Structures are given as structure tokens and as C-alpha cells.
Amino acid sequence: MSLVFSRITSKAQTTVPKDVRQALDVGPGDTLAYRVEGDNVIVTKAPAFDVDYLRAIDASFAEEWLSPEDCAAFDDL
């Protein structure tokens, strides 16, 4: 396990070090996911979204939870 560093800019930006990019197999256009566990953060490569699949299932959810009763039942979830 290696330890690498990067600085935070005044705009709260940082460069992901090359070793980290290679370890995560990420590049331009990829998304990183950050999981906060106490005072530690775990960075992983976020899975790509299957846009065609999401569009296909969108129609099946379009009519759900439209009634005020449904909305009230699921408000606290």
C-alpha cells in the first residue's frame, strides 16, 4: 500500500494523483464516489449508469405514488 498526497486549492479542488487514477482505472468523464466513515473517506470508481436501462424502466414507475395517500405513506422513508 502506498501513500500519496494532493493539496486542496482555494476553490476546494484537487488533482487526483496519477497512482490513484491508475489504481481506480479512472479517466476523463468517469465519476468518483466518496464514502465517509468517521474521519476517513473511501474513494471508489462509481459504476457507470446504463442510461438506456434507466429510460426503459422509467415508464414503469411513472404512475406510482401519485396519490396523496401514497405520498404520505412514503414521506418518511
Image: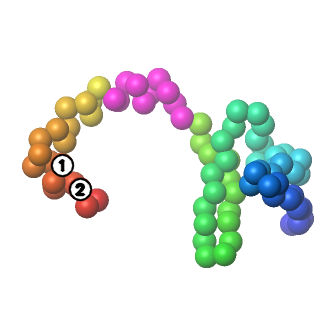
Where residue 71 appears, as percent x and y from the top left, is 18, 48
For residue 69, side relative to residue 22 (left or right): left
Q: What residue lies at 69% left-to-right and 57% top-to-bottom?
A: 43
Mark 2 touches mark 1? (CB < 8 Å): yes
Q: What residue lies at 60% left-to-right and 42% top-to-bottom?
A: 47
Question: Is residue 23 visible in the rendered structure shown here?
Answer: no
User: What secondary structure is marked by label 1?
Assistant: helix
The answer for how far apart the CA atoms under marks 2 and 1 are is: 6 Å
Disc count in the image? 2
Q: Dot 1, crowdedness within 10 Å: few (<14), some or many (≥20)?
A: few
Residue at mark 2: 75
Where residue 64 appears, as percent x and y from the top left, is 20, 37
For residue 64, side relative to residue 35 (left or right): left
Magenta residues span 49-58
| Residue 67 lies within the magenta run | no
Where residue 16 appears, as percent x and y from the top left, is 82, 50
Residue type at mark 2?
Asp
What label sits on residue 52 in the rendered view? Answer: none
Up the image or down, 50 lies above or below 13; here it is: above
Residue type at mark 1?
Cys
| Viewport quadrant of the N terminus | bottom right
Q: What residue lies at 88% left-to-right and 66% top-to-bottom?
A: 3
For residue 56, side relative to residue 43 (left or right): left
Q: Dot 2, crowdedness within 10 Å: few (<14), some or many (≥20)?
A: few
For residue 53, side relative to residue 38 (left or right): left
Colouring method of the image: rainbow
The image quadrant of residue 65 is top left
Up the image or down, 34 lies above or below 39; here it is: above
Kindly report the secondary structure that dominates the magenta region of the rendered protein.
helix
User: What secondary structure is marked by label 2?
Assistant: loop
Residue at mark 1: 71
Q: What residue lies at 35% left-to-right and 29% top-to-bottom?
A: 57
